[in-house]
Image (tube, rainbow, N blue to C red):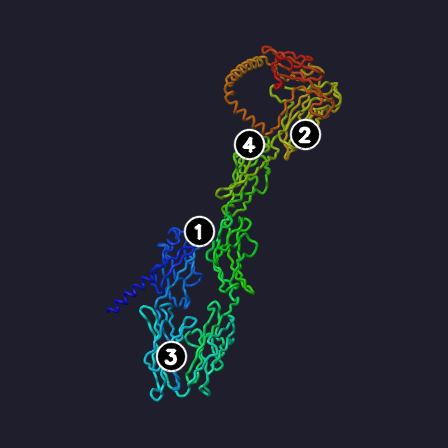
Amino acid sequence: MVQETTTRRTMRRQVLLFLSVLCLGCVLGQVSYSVPEEMAKSSVVGNIAHDLGLDLKRLKSGKARVYTGGSVEYIGLNKERGVLFIQERIDREALCGETTPCALHFQLILENPMELFRVTVEITDINDNTPTFTNAEKRFEISESAVIGSKFVLEKAIDSDIGINGLQQYSLASTDNFVLKLENQADGSKKVEMVLQKPLDREKQEHISLLLTAIDGGEPQMSGTLRILVNVLDVNDNAPAFVKPLYKAKILENSPKGTSVTTVSASDKDIGINGEVSYIISTSKRILSELFNINSKTGEIVLVGEIDYEKAKMYQIDIEAVDSGGLSDSTKVIVDVVDINDNNPDINIVSKSESILEDSPPNTVIAMLSVNDPDSENNGDVECNIDGDIPFKIKTTSNGFYTLVTEVDLDRETASQYNITVTCSDEGVPSLSSSVTLSLQISDVNDNAPVFERSSYEAYIVENNTPGLSIFTVKSRDADWNQNARVSYILEDSSVNGVPVSSYVSVSADSGVIHAVRSFDYEQIKDFHFRVKAQDGGSPPLSSNVTVKVLIQDQNDNPPQVLYPVQTGGSLVAELVPRSADVGYLVTKVVAVDVDSGQNAWLSYKLQKATDRALFEVGLQNGEIRTIRQVTDKDAVKQRLTVIVEDNGQPSRSATVIVNVAVADSFPEVLSEFTDFTQDKEYNDNLTFFLVLALAVVSFLFITCLVVIISVKIYRWRQSRVMYSSNLPVIPYYPPRYSDTLGTGTGTLQHVYNYEVCRTTDSRKSDCKFSGAGSQNVLIMDPSSTGTMQRIQSERSILDEPDSPLEVGHLV
């Protein structure tokens, strides 16, 4: 019971000692811990967050994780507590064997931004392995003539523990003839020999049984035993002896099986069967018997397994030489393994980004790589490069770790994806290399405004169109992608002659089709322009605009308008032609205009009807009515001509005008022919009364409307601007007199024509007063006149009279 209590206290003290974690300090992103092997799972190794000065939120946001490079993750990370804990059972002997110190090396990786911390956890040994012997018993056959001091090499015990927990001592029990001898060797192990201290006597004791005990230094101590059976023989009293106490050899790794390593040699002074020596490899290390074999007769050591420098750089082989009498000697063979460049660099992607924004600044980290080459010296020195001419570079961050970063600004419109091939080569001869390819998508940002196909557009539409008619389509292109390249078309606010442009046209937001909102009239507006904006769907949106000019095309939708002679319903206008008129005499000229344009406004004149078609003709282009023969006394005084005016449109439009011609030399002749007009004095008196009444009403309305006119002056002014900008043709008014400065031309009214005008001089009288000038006359007959018509020749024009009650625009 006391022993159990002591044992528990000892174990508790040991556990407390092993569980104390020593943080060796963080230097340049490195932290070290020390823990004993065989700790229970979930045991805390250390507070990594505290030791590295990291916040727990940083561990979570940075997706902290342990990176071991593909090996077993013995240590785990608790991000909630910020501690490292035992994740898998750790057996120091299985992990490191005899290597000291034994340590786990791994990295703590954080992202956003990427950070790397190196962590070292030293695994300390505990006494969990018992010293053991390969064989349960060892047999010796010793000649009874063996001299005192004869040595017999015993099998070494194997204890996987190290240090104080490893093998410390041997003891040999139940013997009077032998004593145990221990000899320290260069590798730190002990050579175990059994030395004869008392001569053997086969007759007294033919078989001797001994117990060899191997004891370690742990608490509690553990031990293992080997049963030694000695068969005493006669005569052979000399043991073999090696030529050298130590042999050294070198061999290339990956050498083929059967390669000779070296040859050992031992001699025995005995002769015959007692002098025959056999060579064996000590079984203290199992792996040696798997890699090497020795010819028992010649002592040649040959390779029987595969040697890898990366697994073991040196082997120590214990060779025994045994003669037939059981006498033996031992030597050590140290085999150095020579490295060759037989390992390609191993590339592991620690972390990478699948995509990156095209406006990311240079030196943005897109991947972190771990590169390891297990070869040594130059064979293990690695250099990494990026294949191809792409805007990336690779940088070394720490031993074996590289970061892949952007070198310049990226442009998705130039390249939307990159396949980045990283090649790592060692410096061996020949050089070995490995490659890894990373695919990186370049995410779009809205850095391109829409671009129209043209700098400006012109569209044509025929007047009198149907509202909603498609006029034209504008197109733009955006080099961005997806939503950033989705273009919408917007009609910019502007006005046409003071009217919003939206009342003229509309633009389809999706297709850019321009539609007419109203029906256009060429005579009111011939062209107009506006701006269309193309805006993408990015945030913030980018836009550009273009000017569109719409030209209205004319249609033949207006008939000719006759300006002269003026057609009136109340009085009759007659052109006076003297009977002495010669051939080609200009009677009058029909003046007409067409508000259309182009060939739609080209007018032609034709004589449709005439009292005497052989007397008059009409100029096709200028509308001049001339005599085509000499006027005679037989010609009727009253001549009625019907002239048709046609334009050149398709289909053509026309207008007709009636021209009355009086063929006479005096007014009495004319009056005798125009007797069908009734002279009703009562009718004239009534007409005068109504004219006076109308003048009074008009004066009243003029005064009343004066205030209204002033109030709407601005509105009418704006309306007048609309009419001016519409470029409508101006319809000229031709007064009854025309001057021809050229004398005989082909223009409109090429000669000087003066017309007599009949007007009322007194509203209470029925007389008609004529004013005239020149040699030609116009006869105006008013049916309401009852007095005598007089022909008055005067050089004074009626238009020059300041008191004339008849305005030029009212001449009939």
312 lies above or below 758: below
The quarter of the picture where residue 73 lies is: bottom left
Mark 1–mark 3 Cα distance, whole angstroms, equals: 67 Å
Tell me which label, 1 or 4, sits earlier in the chain: 1
Mark 2–mark 1 Cα distance, whole angstroms, equals: 88 Å
Judged left or right of residue 660, residue 213 is: left
Tell me which label, 3 or 2, sits earlier in the chain: 3
The quarter of the picture where residue 753 lies is: top right
Amino acid marked by disc 3: Met
Label 4 sits on residue: 496
Label 2 sits on residue: 604
Label 1 sits on residue: 112
Label 3 sits on residue: 194
Badge 4 marks a residue whose secondary structure is strand
Tell me which label, 1 or 3, sits earlier in the chain: 1
Amino acid marked by disc 4: Val
Mark 4–mark 2 Cα distance, whole angstroms, equals: 36 Å
Q: Residue at x 54, y 62 (%)?
A: 427
